[in-house]
Image: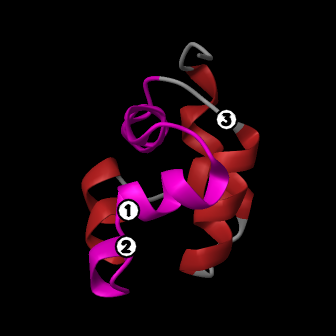
Amino acid sequence: MLSPNQIKARLIERGITQAAIAQRLRVSHITVSIVIGGYGTSRRIQEYIADILGIKFKDLWNNNSHRKAA
């Protein structure tokens, strides 16, 4: 599992912003930030991020399951 900072760094390496993810998924950039930070969950956002990073969903988000869902 990657930490929130590692996820952000990998997105930056690929030239992908949280705002771009939000626009693509039609959610607020705050929602994307909350999900990346682990303070909330959204299966759709998490799957999209896992897909663009080329990481299996369960490998990227597995340890965030104990956090409260948004």
Q: Picture quarter containing residue 41?
A: top right
Q: Which residue is drawn at 58% across and 63% down?
A: 49
Residue tagged by mark 1?
7
Query: For numbered disc 3, what is the local secondary structure?
Result: loop
Res. 11 mark: 2
Magenta stretch containing residue 27, yes or no? yes
Mark 2 Cα within 10 Å, few/some/many (few <14, many 20+)?
some
Marks 1 and 2 close (CB-CB < 8 Å)? yes
Would residue 29 be found to the left or right of residue 1 on screen? left
Res. 61 mark: none
Marks 3 and 1 close (CB-CB < 8 Å)? no
Quarter of the C terminus within the rendering: top right
Question: In the image, residue 17 lies at what x, y percent?
Answer: 34, 66
Q: Residue at x 46, y 42 (%)?
A: 32
Region rendered in magenta = 11-39
Q: Residue at x 35, y 52 (%)?
A: 3
Would residue 20 be found to the left or right of residue 54 on screen? left
Residue tagged by mark 3?
42
Amino acid type of the residue that numbered disc 2 sits on in the rendered structure: Leu
The single residue placed furthest to the bottom in the displayed view is: 14
Tell me how far mark 2 sits from mark 3, CA to CA: 18 Å
